[in-house]
Amino acid sequence: MPNPATHAAVGSAEGGGTDAPEHESRVPWLLRWQGLFASSSGPLARNLPLLAGLVLCALMAGLPLVTRAGLSLLILSSGLLWLIWALCTPAGRIGPISGWLLLMLGLAVLATGFSPVPTAAAKGLLKLVSYLGVYALMRQLLATAPVWWDRIVAALLGGQLITAVIGIRQLYADSSALARWSDPNSVAEGTVRIYSTLGNPNLLAGYLLPILPLAAVAMLCWRRPMARLYALSALLIGVAALMLTYSRGGWLGLVGALGSLALLLALRASRHWSPLLRRLFPLLLLLGGALVLVVAVSQVEALRVRVLSLVAGREDSSNNFRINVWMAALQMVQDRPWLGIGPGNTIFNLIYPLYQQPKFNALSAYSIPLELAVEGGIPGLLAGLGLLQCSLRQGLSQLRREHPHVLPALGAVAAIVGLCVQGLTDTIFFRPEVQLTGWFCLATLATLPLAADG
């Protein structure tokens, strides 16, 4: 990422940078409260970027290592820091990504008000607000001091390295604890799956998934050899740990994340080539990647068994479980199509038993699109798709530009693609260990130079 001087024009793109305040009539009424204490120049106001950076680095490094109480404290601290910073900083206009997030928040408020159990839905709404506070602080920090992108990624990679090493070491310890993740009714019976500090192989895969493209981008961006070696180590060990989770969604997400990153980097590298080569090279890259996957699946038995379980239909217990949950979730959407049941897992756990098939209890809809539709109805699903489209467009618009933001933007796009692929059949994304990395990717895209054009 560039230094703050090269990033000066980005500050107001998403509302809340450090540029000169706009005329009050141009500031959205929703942000009129920002900058009330803009004249303050005390030590707290002067050191807000440093405080925010340290808190965010601690949060991102500690995602898989800190207790839930510790994570909650860091998330709350992030929200409070953003609130203080917003009071000290004149508001800019709301950018496209933040606009979609505000729409989703507004729909969540409505869904909570019309929920069958508003008090339960309110807990989910508070979680959403707390995560948005982290996003807002990340966006504010990256818009004001872009150098913190490298530091936050370095902290993220540190936590990932520790977690991945702990997970891999589980293979050399007592395997009886790992055996509980071996499903005797699955096509992949007997597979040993690691879970590290997170207690769940699918959660470990979801945590690692969005970090890996960021590690690849950091390896390309950072100039010092030791920093590049650090990023490369995080990438290789992270890929190994993700593969050892034997999470089918994680594997598919890994292919989507690193495959899309490789394709985007190839497109960027070929932008000065002849038109014919520009068209042929991405196609050849895709064919080569597909050939490598086919050979790997056909030659490695463990891969072949897990891939075959994908097409086993209801004969695989995991597939059968998800299909039954999806059918129940679709019925929930049909009964409440406009505002859903309200946000959060608390309200889901109260309403889902009314629809579930016997012996198929679930904590979520096991699909991000279905979860959005269940919680916020069809408008909530459309808002989520709008946010996705806006984010991808924002990142891809940087593809042929010449500025230091390009590689972080492409890494964020690749991470989002990976999360979306995994999220088609799982809702691990809604756990804070995964979701906060997703917010960091959105904050990266929200501070791009063309954010105001979106």
Image (cartoon, grey):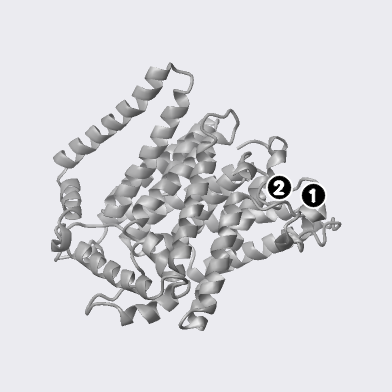
Q: Residue at x 67, y 46 (%)?
A: 13
Q: CB under 8 Å between callouts 1 and 2?
A: yes
Amino acid type for the residue under numbered disc 1? Glu
Viewer-side residue, 7 vs 26: 26
Quadrant of the image occupied by residue 340: bottom left
Q: Is residue 396 left or right of residue 263?
A: right
Neighbour class for label 2 at 10 Å: few (<14), some, many (≥20)? many
Q: Residue at x 84, y 58 (%)?
A: 42
Residue 314 falls left or right of residue 348: left
Q: Quadrant of the N terminus?
A: top right
Estimate the x, y position of residue 79 in percent, counting from the top left. Answer: 63, 64
Mark 1 lies on residue: 22
Q: x%, y% of residue 253?
A: 34, 48
Q: Relative to 125, does residue 235 appear above or below in the rendering?
A: above
Q: Quadrant of residue 102?
A: bottom right
Residue that carries the numbered disc 2 in the rendered image: 12
The three-letter code of the residue at mark 2 reads Ser
Which of these two is toward me, 108 or 142? 108
Tag nearer the camera, 1 or 2: 1
Q: CA distance from mark 1 to mark 2?
A: 9 Å
